[in-house]
Amino acid sequence: MNTPSAEQFCNSWKDLYIAALFENDKPKIAGRIAEAQAAILARRRKLTVSVADVRERHSLDNALFSLEALRTCLSILPAAIASSLQHQVSG
């Protein structure tokens, strides 16, 4: 089994982040945002405290902030809240 390299992790969250920012199919945007946020948080957990990692951590934090701003501007509920509300309505 191949373990993803640091470069692959870095490219993965960036690709998902860009896909979320430029998704033009409104029903897919919330999913893209959630997927990108999960990848960013997973990458952030893997980082150490080296200078290079601090720079990437700043990039990750900025990306998370941007995704949250996009979600807010589009009035998309976070996945956890949306799921909870759906359960309350249906049951």
Image (spheres, rainbow, N blue to C red):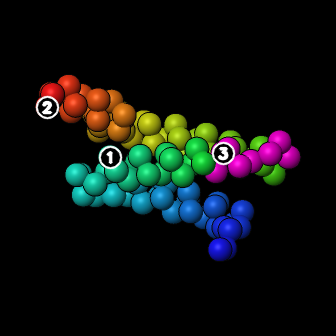
Extreme residue toward the top, this view: 88
Q: Position of residue 39 (x, y in %)?
A: 54, 52
Q: Position of residue 3 (x, y in %)?
A: 68, 68
Residue type, mark 3 in image: Arg
Disc nearer the start of the sequence (1/3): 1
Q: Residue at x 56, y 63 (%)?
A: 12
Assess whether mark 3 and mark 2 are in contact (beta carbons under 8 angstroms): no
Disc nearer the start of the sequence (2/1): 1
Residue of label 3 = 44
Residue of label 2 = 90
Q: Is residue 91 above or below residue 56?
A: above
Q: Nearer the viewer, residue 18 or 85?
A: 85
Residue type, mark 2 in image: Ser
Residue type, mark 1 in image: Ala
Quick one: label 1, few (<14), some, or many (20+) residues within 10 Å? Answer: many
Q: Position of residue 70 (x, y in %)?
A: 39, 41
Q: Residue at x 40, y 48 (%)?
A: 33
SS at badge 1 = helix
Q: Residue at x 81, y 51 (%)?
A: 52
Residue of label 1 = 30
Q: Is residue 9 above or below residue 82?
A: below
Extreme residue toward the bottom, this view: 1
**Which labelled disc corresponds to residue 45?**
none
Q: Looking at the rendering, which quadrant does residue 1 occupy?
A: bottom right
Q: Residue at x 61, y 39 (%)?
A: 61
Disc nearer the start of the sequence (2/3): 3
Assess whether mark 1 and mark 2 are in contact (beta carbons under 8 angstroms): no
Which of discs 2 and 1 lies nearer the camera? The answer is: 2
Q: Is 18 part of what is drawn in magenta? A: no
Q: Which residues are magenta?
A: 43-50
